[in-house]
Structure formats: C-alpha cells, structure tokens
Image: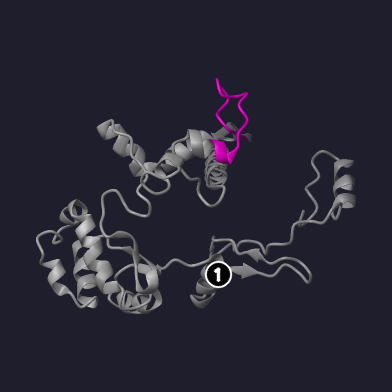
Amino acid sequence: MHCTITGFGSGAGARLPGYDFVVQAVGGLMSITGEPGGTPLKAGVALVDVLTAKDATTGILAALRHRDRTGQGQLVEVNLLSSLLGSLVNQASGYLATGHDPGPMGNRHPSIAPYETLACREGQLLAVAVGNDRQFRELARVLGAPELAEDLRFARNEDRVRNRTDLIKALEDRLAADTPHGWTGRLSAASVPCGPVNTVSEALELAARLGLDPVTPVGEGRTPQVTSPLRLSGTPVAQPFAPPRLDEHGTALRTWLSGPADDPLPPRM
C-alpha cells in the first residue's frame, strides 16, 4: 500500500506543479477571500497543504483498516485541488444550487447575521457568531438594547441578513461603549459566541489559560513545538521532538539503509 499526493491528480493535471498559493487561486478560494471589491487574497497559512495532508491521513487510515480486514493493500491518491474544492462546503453548494458564483464578503457570513467582526471602542474588532435567534436576543439584552430583538428588521435571522447594514450600525453604536475584551466577558457569560481578534501570541496564551497546553518543549536550545491537537485517552500522541540538525540522524539512517530490508526504523527517527 502507498499514498501519492499531487497538485492536480494523476490524469490530465499530472504534469502541473502543485503549489499551495497557486491552488488557492485556481481553486476558487481567493475569489471568496477578502473585502468586497478588493483584491482577492490567499489565506494566511498554506491552508491547502494542511487540508490535503489531513485528507491523506484519513485515506491511509481507511486503507489500513481495509487491509486489516482483507489483507489487501491499495493505492491512496489525494491532490491539492480536490482537497480545496471539498473544503469549499457551503460556498460550492451555493454555486451548485443557484449557478451563481459567490464573492468575497470580508468577515461576513453569506447567510447568517451578525456573524462577522464588529467595531468596538476605538475601532477595535470583536468577532461575533450569532447562530440563532435566541443568541441574538441575548446579544441585544447584554448590549442594553433588548428592543433590537423585537424590531421586525432584526427579529429573525433572515430579517437580519436582509437588513444587515442597519443591523451592524445599530450594534456598533452600542459596542463603542467598551473594548472587545470587556464585551467578551459579558457576552460569553450570556452564551453569545464571541471573542477579540487575537494575534498568534495571544491565541497561544488563550489556549494555555484554557488548559490546552498548546506548546511543548523539545529540548534545551531547541525551538518549542505546537502541541498536537489530538487527545487520545488510551494511546496518547508521542512526545514531539525537534527537527533534526544537519546529519543529526545520519549515522543511524545510513546504518539502517545498509541493513536487511525488513529492519524497522531506529527509534525517534
């Protein structure tokens, strides 16, 4: 059994080089990322590479389960473009249902409101994800404007989407009274999903406060690593170790390569 990872599959696209940035462009992701009327933008990380690696892992695990049951191996194929298209979920489904291409909406959700970043004191941004009418009523109450939930323009989600411009103005007028961190405490207590737009360092600090142990040391003088997101009760993920220095494992690898074909890899290789 083996797995191949390509940019555009093993057929007509086999000779095309696979680069994350290019696939984000040709795969439609950049066309829906950014502000309306602005320049199309890529994601801030090599998102397609990450998605494809996870798809490869899923495929390999499925093939291993099949091998365990039948003794038969198989070829697992994944490609960057297909992984990206699979991740477009509601945006791709919307196009298939209507025939209309979606476009960039900044931080807004195409069919839920308010589900976006909203300006607070001094223009600082708060991410708010109000997914149902109950949450909107709680949002309005915490903002000191319960009447917004009774306003026919905003009472139901479809109304809020239709009248989004008026809705956002009404909310931001009230959010201007405090900072994102101030509102986060009060809104979270009311079970309204929200949070400030953190930097990477702030995100790691948040995860640490929540007891998620997001960073793992890997030895003196080595750069710490981000902890695996997997939590397995019976078979915990192995302790990570630092990327090897040049030829750090060279002797062990050369010894293994010169040995019998069925020798296992040396430990921690």
Residue drawn at 20 percent across, 59 percent down: 166
Residue drawn at 20 percent across, 71 percent down: 140
Residue drawn at 25 percent across, 62 percent down: 168
For label 1, the crowd category at 10 Å Cα-Cα, with few meaning under 14, some 14 to 19 and many 20 or more, is some
Relative height, residue 23 to residue 46 (above, below): above
Q: How many marks?
A: 1
Relative height, residue 200 to residue 14 (above, below): below
Most frequent secondary structure within the magenta stretch = loop
Q: Is residue 217 left or right of residue 117?
A: right
Give residue 111's position: percent from left, percent from top: 26, 49
Q: Quadrant of residue 32?
A: top left
Q: Which residue is mark 1?
A: 204
Q: Is residue 216 left or right of residue 83?
A: right
Give residue 68's position: percent from left, percent from top: 57, 41
Q: Which quadrant does the N terminus fall into?
A: top right
> In the image, is residue 144 part of the stretch drawn in magenta?
no
Q: Quadrant of residue 188?
A: bottom left
Please tell me which residue lies in front, 245 or 75: 245
Q: Is residue 268 left or right of residue 177?
A: right
**Scheme by which the image is coloured:** one colour
Please tell me which residue lies in front, 223 or 101: 101
Visible residue check, residue 200: yes
Give residue 239's position: percent from left, percent from top: 67, 64
Residue drawn at 27 percent across, 76 percent down: 190
Residue type at numbered disc 1: Leu
Q: Mark 1 falls on what kind of element?
A: helix
Please tell me which residue lies in front, 8 or 124: 124
Visible residue check, residue 29: no
Where are the magenta residues, as a range?
4-22
Give residue 259's position: percent from left, percent from top: 88, 42
> In the image, is residue 16 part of the stretch drawn in magenta?
yes
